[in-house]
Image (cartoon, coloured by chain):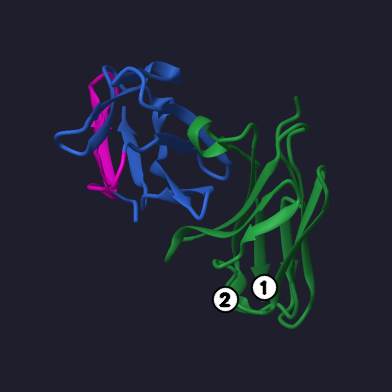
Amino acid sequence: AQSVTQLDSHVSVSEGTPVLLRCNYSSSYSPSLFWYVQHPNKGLQLLLKYTSAATLVKGINGFEAEFKKSETSFHLTKPSAHMSDAAEYFCVVSEVTSGTYKYIFGTGTRLKVLA
Amino acid sequence: DAGVIQSPRHEVTEMGQEVTLRCKPISGHNSLFWYRQTMMRGLELLIYFNNNVPIDDSGMPEDRFSAKMPNASFSTLKIQPSEPRDSAVYFCASGGGTTPAVYGYTFGSGTRLTVV
């Protein structure tokens, strides 16, 4: 079965410095991987997705993620943090069970951006 | 496109009462998911529909929970009777095409349920 591990429950960065949110996955085949963001009291918004095309995936708001099969990682990065990036971020792998698809969510990483 | 619409946004109810949460998926999407989010358990998939048919309800916690999708544009999640431990944010998500999990789902803004 697929699984996903977010290595940090909380990350704090200063505004203008780089962001790195780490995610490792476990999958028996080439997975589909996603990052979602959830701002306080809001729903989840898709940031970016990897679906076996280019290994470096660019998303919205300047975020990108690199799929590294050898490391089973899909870390999320951004060169320069903005105050509005403060939110919770979820790494997600899709799983196929009995011919149907569903998401497996990581436990989330809460990003704090310091002024 | 109004996105996935959930109602109500907030619900406060007394223990033992029936609660019904509603979801309108994006038009044309053929997959619909109900999730529950709590601090303790994170995001849990409760049930999944494809073409209005329940495919996987293994995440539904107990018989007190039931979900229906009478047509492609409407789904309900009902809790009867409700208990304080059901307090959570409940999200509905929809996806289109034959492989929605490959191309991403769209989530609603959620219903925050408080059972007192």
Which amino acid is tagged 1? Val
Residue designated by label 2: B85
Which amino acid is tagged 2? Arg
Can residue A100 be found in the magenta stretch? no
Residue B115's disc is: 1
Q: Looking at this view, name the residue that lies furthest to the right.
A: B70
Residue A113's disc is: none
Q: In the image, residue B107 lies at what x, y percent? A: 61, 40
Q: The chain shown in blue is which?
A: A
Same subunit: marks 1 and 2: yes
Mark 1 lies on a secondary structure that is strand
- Badge 2: few (under 14), some or many (20 or more) residues near its Cα, within 10 Å? few
Which residue does the image show at 37% across and 48% down from the upper left? A108
In the rendered image, which quarter is residue A48 located in? top left
Q: Which residues are magenta?
A: A5-29
Mark 2 lies on a secondary structure that is helix
Q: The chain shown in green is which?
A: B
Which residue does the image show at 63% across and 57% down from the upper left? B55
Looking at marks 1 and 2 on the same chain, the residue that comes earlier in the sequence is marked by 2
Which residue does the image show at 32% across and 32% down from the upper left? A113
Which quadrant would the N terminus of chain B be assigned to in this image? top right
Comparing A32 with B108, the one in front is A32
Q: Is residue B104 left or right of residue A64?
A: right
Comparing B15 with A53, the one in front is A53
Marked residue chain, label 1: B
Residue A107 sits above or below residue A61 on the image: below
Comparing A72 with A58, the one in front is A72
Which residue does the image show at 28% across and 21% down from the upper left? A55
Which quadrant would the C terminus of chain B be assigned to in this image? bottom right
Circles 1 and 2, Cβ within 8 Å, touching? The answer is yes
Q: In the image, residue B27 lies at what x, y percent? A: 78, 32
